[in-house]
Every structure is written in C-alpha cells, then in structure tokens.
Amino acid sequence: MPHLIPAPTIIEAAGHPPKKIEEFIGRVNSGDAALSVARMTSPSGWLEPSQTPEFDEYTVVLRGCLHVESKDGTLEVRAGQAVITRGGEWVRYSTPEEGGAEYIAVCLPAFAPDTVHRDA
C-alpha cells in the first residue's frame, strides 16, 4: 500500500548562516536508509563545511544559484539545472549570491551524519 508522507521533518543544518532542511524521505522522517529526499532553503551567504560523503547526491535547483566546489573547480548550478556529486568526492556547497537558493537533494543511500565526513 502506498505510504503518505504528510509533512517533512526539519533537520538541523551545518554551515552558516543556517539553512533550512526539510526531509521528506530518509532515515529521520520515513525510516528509509536506501535514499533520502529533502528540500533545502539556503540564505544568501550560506557556506557549508567541505565534506567527502559516502553517498551520491543528486541536486535539482528550483530557485537561485547553488555553488558546488570540488577539487576541479566550482560549478554554478542555477534554477532549472541539476548536478550530481559522487560518493568519495570532496565537495563544498554554498549560496553566496543575493537571494540564496532553494533546491531538492536526493542522496543514495540516504544521508546520515556519520557518512558525510565533514572536514574540521
């Protein structure tokens, strides 16, 4: 039988200034470890610590621009575009432009604090 997700769970975010994470599907809200789906709302100037996660992350930008920094450079992912980062890649996300960004992130397997491996 289909399982309705009536509302997301708000998850505490890393980085500054704080962004809003609304997990719809994942370890916290639905008990799923296979993947997670979350809506992110990041203010202008938000910068997350760099990380080398164990999971793949598929991101679709709905509004604004998300900067995705890797060892090869920085991508500017704008509304209507998407980016894929693979597990084991060093990456850092930010929204330095005016207005911030809103985007959907899908992690496979699901995001977990102990598998993101943030830099100190």
Image (spheres, rainbow, N blue to C red):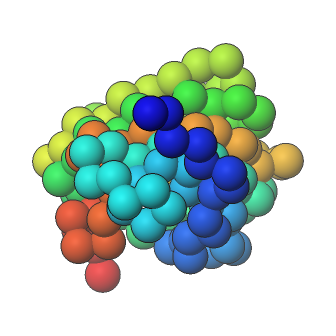
- Residue at 60% from the left image edge and 48% from the top image edge: 5
Q: Is residue 75 visible?
A: no
- Please identify the residue farthest to the bottom as the structure is shown: 120
**Front-most of residues 112 and 78:** 112
Q: Is residue 113 left or right of residue 102?
A: left
**Residue 88 against residue 103 in the figure, above or below:** below
Residue 56 at x, y percent in the picture: 27, 39
Residue 91 at x, y percent in the picture: 33, 50
**Front-most of residues 69 and 59:** 59
- Residue at 51% from the left image edge and 73% from the top image edge: 14
- Residue at 56% from the left image edge and 29% from the top image edge: 60
The N terminus sits in image quarter: top left
Q: Is residue 59 left or right of residue 35?
A: right
- Residue at 68% from the left image edge and 63% from the top image edge: 20
Residue 2 at x, y percent in the picture: 49, 33
Circle count:
0
- Please identify the residue farthest to the top as the structure is shown: 80
**Residue 22 against residue 118 in the figure, above or below:** above
Residue 108, quarter of the rendered image: top left
The C terminus sits in image quarter: bottom left
Residue 112 at x, y percent in the picture: 31, 65
Q: Is residue 74 left or right of residue 117?
A: right
- Please identify the residue farthest to the right as the structure is shown: 99
Q: Is residue 30 visible?
A: yes
**Residue 85 against residue 100 in the figure, above or below:** above
